[in-house]
Image: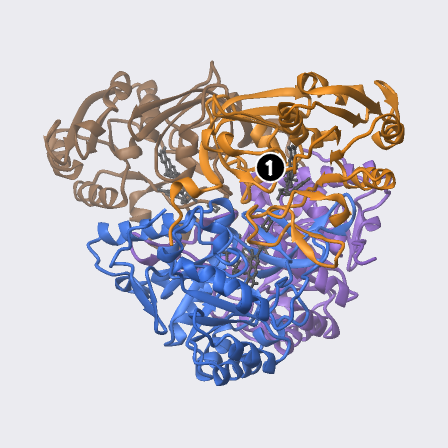
Chain colours: A blue, B purple, C brown, D orange
Amino acid sequence: MAMATSERLRTHLCGIDMASPVLTASGTFGFGEEFADFVDLSALGGVVVKGTTLKPRRGNDGVRMTETPGGMLNCIGLENPGVDYFLGDILPRISKYGMNVIVNISGSTTEEYGELANMLDVDGVAAIELNVSCPNVKDGGIIFGTDAKSAAAVVRSAKAHTTKPVILKLSPNVTDIVSIAKAAEEAGADALSLINTLMGMAIDIRTWRPVLGNVTGGLSGPCVKPVALRMVWQVANAVSIPVIGMGGIETAEDAVEFFLAGASAVSIGTANFRDPSVTMKIISGLDEYLKARGLSSIHDIIGKLKVGE
Amino acid sequence: MAMATSERLRTHLCGIDMASPVLTASGTFGFGEEFADFVDLSALGGVVVKGTTLKPRRGNDGVRMTETPGGMLNCIGLENPGVDYFLGDILPRISKYGMNVIVNISGSTTEEYGELANMLDVDGVAAIELNVSCPNVKDGGIIFGTDAKSAAAVVRSAKAHTTKPVILKLSPNVTDIVSIAKAAEEAGADALSLINTLMGMAIDIRTWRPVLGNVTGGLSGPCVKPVALRMVWQVANAVSIPVIGMGGIETAEDAVEFFLAGASAVSIGTANFRDPSVTMKIISGLDEYLKARGLSSIHDIIGKLKVGE
Amino acid sequence: MVLPENEKTRFAIDTEIVDNKKILPDVFRIRVHAPEIAMIARPGQFIHVRIDSALTILRRPLGVADVDAKEGTVTMFYRLIGKGTHALALMKKGDTVNCLGPLGNGFTLGDGKSLIIGGGMGLAPLLFLSKALAKRGEKADLLLGGRNSDEIFWQKYFEPFVEHIHITTDDGSMGQKGFTTDALPDMLNKTHYDTIYVCGPDIMMRKIYEIAKEKGVPCQVSLERRMACGMGACLSCVVDTNDGKRKKVCTDGPVFWAQEVL
Amino acid sequence: MVLPENEKTRFAIDTEIVDNKKILPDVFRIRVHAPEIAMIARPGQFIHVRIDSALTILRRPLGVADVDAKEGTVTMFYRLIGKGTHALALMKKGDTVNCLGPLGNGFTLGDGKSLIIGGGMGLAPLLFLSKALAKRGEKADLLLGGRNSDEIFWQKYFEPFVEHIHITTDDGSMGQKGFTTDALPDMLNKTHYDTIYVCGPDIMMRKIYEIAKEKGVPCQVSLERRMACGMGACLSCVVDTNDGKRKKVCTDGPVFWAQEVL
Ligand SMILES: Cc1cc2nc3c(=O)[nH]c(=O)nc-3n(C[C@H](O)[C@H](O)[C@H](O)COP(=O)(O)OP(=O)(O)OC[C@H]3O[C@@H](n4cnc5c(N)ncnc54)[C@H](O)[C@@H]3O)c2cc1C
Ligand SMILES: Cc1cc2nc3c(=O)[nH]c(=O)nc-3n(C[C@H](O)[C@H](O)[C@H](O)COP(=O)(O)OP(=O)(O)OC[C@H]3O[C@@H](n4cnc5c(N)ncnc54)[C@H](O)[C@@H]3O)c2cc1C
Ligand SMILES: Cc1cc2nc3c(=O)[nH]c(=O)nc-3n(C[C@H](O)[C@H](O)[C@H](O)COP(=O)(O)O)c2cc1C
Ligand SMILES: Cc1cc2nc3c(=O)[nH]c(=O)nc-3n(C[C@H](O)[C@H](O)[C@H](O)COP(=O)(O)O)c2cc1C
Ligand code: FES
Ligand code: FES
């Protein structure tokens, strides 16, 4: 399905030329190729690929996913083939789709983020997203994501080792997301993305055991949208680098809320499972929203929320 | 509607004799009397009345409530007639229902919590719940709820001025709920209740304005259940005082999850709006759950979640 | 203390839909079998409807437009707005909706000659009111307004219960061109009314009240606010009163004397 | 790069329900009009069904039990489990469900004599398999197990496509008393099978495989895992392989050679 690209939606995000401000969220869209039957991948702003680590990872054992009211919990736990395999096999294979490939990375130490950023400083990678907020693995960075100083250190480490734009992905499981966002900006992050999943849990009342193999998991989907939107608004008001908003976006209308709150782009996660071509519908819906209001660019709505009076 | 009380469900919580371990959550059940057509109030473990302050409060202006996927946002903002009116008019009026009245209080200073706790140290009040987590008013305590030291100070202040059991209500909008819970226990809290609402937001894409008069509001309802359950489990594992679990409970099955996670009682909030007699259904459902498994007491399932092996 | 069944003033019951008819492209009339509610509902009260087929958490308030105590039915009218009302429109005869009600205080029925003024879906509760006033002995007059003739379908429902019907449309496609507020001064000059009852958009109610106040005619208004509980427990629905306080629209209202809240 | 329509191997389409019949108190058979899928689906593949009337976020995977390429229909059987399947059971002829598929790899159809073994809803994908094997020229034998005779309704569907049907029930109320695994050794002694195809509870598949391995009969199994995307993107559905790796049940499976995953 070839999408007509619209000038209204074309945008730049930390130097990356994007056909639209609609990306797909890490871990929900594979490497993009899985959705080629349903999506014109080049019409997306970018595909953020599954969390990648230095060594291959097996992820968590047991049940990895369960549905909840208005959402789902997952505890995949960063299963991935490792950065070498990504660079050697996957990246060459997916380059034909003409999409911006943004690589989501996780390290167990500050240095590992630098090492990964360095290895990914290659043609075909548009940007690097630092996952410091995976709630599903003990060494997957959640410690970095809940503390402003560690988050800044991870950003500096990545920035020092790559020429690519560096995006920090923020955890919502914090008291003060703004202080972490500001620390990341000061440390040189080119953009921020939020939110990662909220940490949650489900219990099987027949077996008296946790439903998920990892006991807890990350909550995503429409149910988290109000929390995500609030955080995007808080962060976008506090920093001057661009913000990629995500969390429960299912429709163009949802996306408009995030743009008004200050997001420069949005990312779509769980909604892809319900409707594999949902991103295409969001893109055309956004274009119609702008057209109907006589607006010539998505920038005309970014951060335009009116508060007060 | 007179409920047959069941010995299986009778319990004690920090000295309060409860016909069942099912309470109603502050702000969602008025003063109990509003539901007398639908609920046998004496069959409840207790009614936690609306957040009460020293002086009457008008609450927030503008729209105070909006529905979200699987939940709702509210920004009532602690509208209440003040503690004097509560003691002089409301408490005498509702005493005929034979229910445990737990008063949820909010102060703008540590001292105010003490003052309120002192004033409420009267017959007819079963316990005092400290709301240090209202996200909807600037001086309503959220500062106390997101910091372990301040939370402990509020608990100490209340404990010093009342002989009633003191329950601290925890905010979910924090990085580390366990540290706050532990600080409260150490400061002498008799029980903990959680969660209060998650801070969220909604935007009207026609007017480009926040839907809520207060811009942000508190998210409640089934959508928050996974987060609430995870926090109850974390806290119940870390403290030895009883935990009152709440957040999105709609059915007896939901409640069982909270008991297995370690809650000694549960509180029902938003679900009362959908079905005013939902608490009665939860009570009989719990009794059936226990009966079907040959269990003689709710205590047989509290904290019995099996993790590992 | 447990309330005996016969002291209950409100019920939450699964009701069967008797019919659910499209009246206009975006307006439906629904009748449900709810004998407990039909027996006691008063004009100005409302029903909090739970539409389980919509992915909704909260009920939706709809005014009681009529009751048939013998048949045990309650009639409501609704306009398609969002997901709740759209889902309700898909429901069919025989399907079940849970109705919580009757809620709210209702109109205070005065003696003498009444004028009923309504705009849009505000006419729904006024229909039940007109019937009650007629039963008391003196039929009211009705002033009803809409954007154009397409929107005006209420006459046939009101006709049996009111004396004169005066219609205004914004575009003049039916009745007098203009707003109800344009027609009102003349009507008040011609006829002496003891009470005015209004339900419609806030701005209309405000203007009606100003005119009525000038002429010294007491005025009751029925307000709309977003409601979660509908029973006075959650404080979602408050309105500022002129003495600087706040009241709950769901239990202190939805009907107020205009001077209290406008 | 954009995939041309004719290179697509999967579709997400709104399909009309042709019929949706109760077979047992808790088992339904549904047929949907999905020509694009019916044209290309292979035995062992599945459909990811979106049931919008349920308050669900995720689709529900159901095996393809039959297709009619001419009519453009796809048949599935489902057991009532939770809210998704219960909501599906309420849907009627003419209603719409969105079907994503065909997904998964499907069975590898071997030559020679086949034995098909199924338990519970595992029989659904095996039905389509039996038809395909029959079309290739050699009808398979079928060994089917259930708790009691009430659960066994599959014979009439399989009869046209298989040679022998052997039934076991846990309580002996129909066929041989015991499990399929009790009947299997004898069947393998009596007949030479080139391939065994199994779908059913994990524990049953594991035991079948052990017996088959001993006799040296290659064995394909169809696995079930919770699935979010169904398309290999989310890694919800992985299975441990015997070389210490993990594979995705939705795209690398759901059918595997038993030695790879058991
Ligand atoms: C006392 C009272 C009586 C009413 N009587 C009628 C009637 O007889 N006929 C009729 O057509 N409408 C009536 N309304 C308005 C009706 O309740 C709303 O149109 C309806 O709730 C919209 O629901 P929705 O799901 O279609 O819209 P959505 O936009 O999906 O609703 C989302 C949320 O907003 C709330 N909401 C949206 N619009 C309104 C509104 N105008 N008033 C209150 N809440 C709103 C809903 O309750 C819900 O919580 C009445 C409202 C009140 C308060
Ligand atoms: C490849 C594949 C093919 C299947 N084919 C069939 C079939 O032909 N007939 C049939 O009756 N069933 C089949 N199942 C099982 C079927 O998908 C589940 O019974 C169904 O998803 C339950 O949904 P629910 O909403 O009724 O239950 P719920 O309990 O509400 O489901 C909650 C969640 O658990 C998941 N879930 C629950 N049970 C299962 C299960 N056994 N397998 C996978 N996910 C589950 C659901 O997808 C959902 O995410 C198949 C499963 C898979 C993976
Ligand atoms: C199955 C699944 C796997 C995920 N894996 C990752 C991951 O590897 N790295 C990451 O940063 N976020 C991951 N996420 C989080 C999403 O990228 C996104 O931040 C979150 O789901 C909120 O968006 P949504 O509500 O639109 O799904 C994952 C989410 C899901 C549902
Ligand atoms: C309308 C509304 C008003 C509330 N007011 C208060 C309050 O005054 N004090 C308080 O501690 N919590 C208040 N809460 C929070 C609830 O007591 C409860 O903690 C929360 O809603 C989660 O439970 P639930 O999902 O069952 O509603 C309020 C919640 C709602 C929905
Ligand atoms: S709707 Fe809850 S108090 Fe009025
Ligand atoms: S279900 Fe998503 S990878 Fe298999």
Residue C251 in percent (x, y) is at 46, 42
Position of C244 relative to D52 (above/below): below
- Between C131 and D64, the one lying in front of the other is D64
The image quarter containing residue C76 is top left
Residue B5 is at least partly visible in this image? no
At 60% across and 66% down in the image, what residue appears?
A: A134
In-image side of C170 versus D211 (left or right) = left
Q: Residue under circle 1?
A: D45
- Between C112 and C223, the one lying in front of the other is C223
Residue D207 in percent (x, y) is at 84, 39
Q: How many labels does the image show?
A: 1
The image quarter containing residue D235 is bottom right
- Looking at the picture, which amino acid does disc 1 mark? Gln
Q: Confirm or reject: label 1 Cβ below 8 Å from ligand 2.
A: no
Helix, strand or loop at label 1? It is loop
- Between A116 and D241, the one lying in front of the other is D241
- Between B31 and B282, the one lying in front of the other is B282
Position of C18 relative to A19 (above/below): above
Q: How crowded is mark 1: few (under 14 residues within 10 Å), some or many (20 or more)?
A: many
In-image side of B41 versus A194 (left or right) = right
Residue D160 in percent (x, y) is at 67, 16
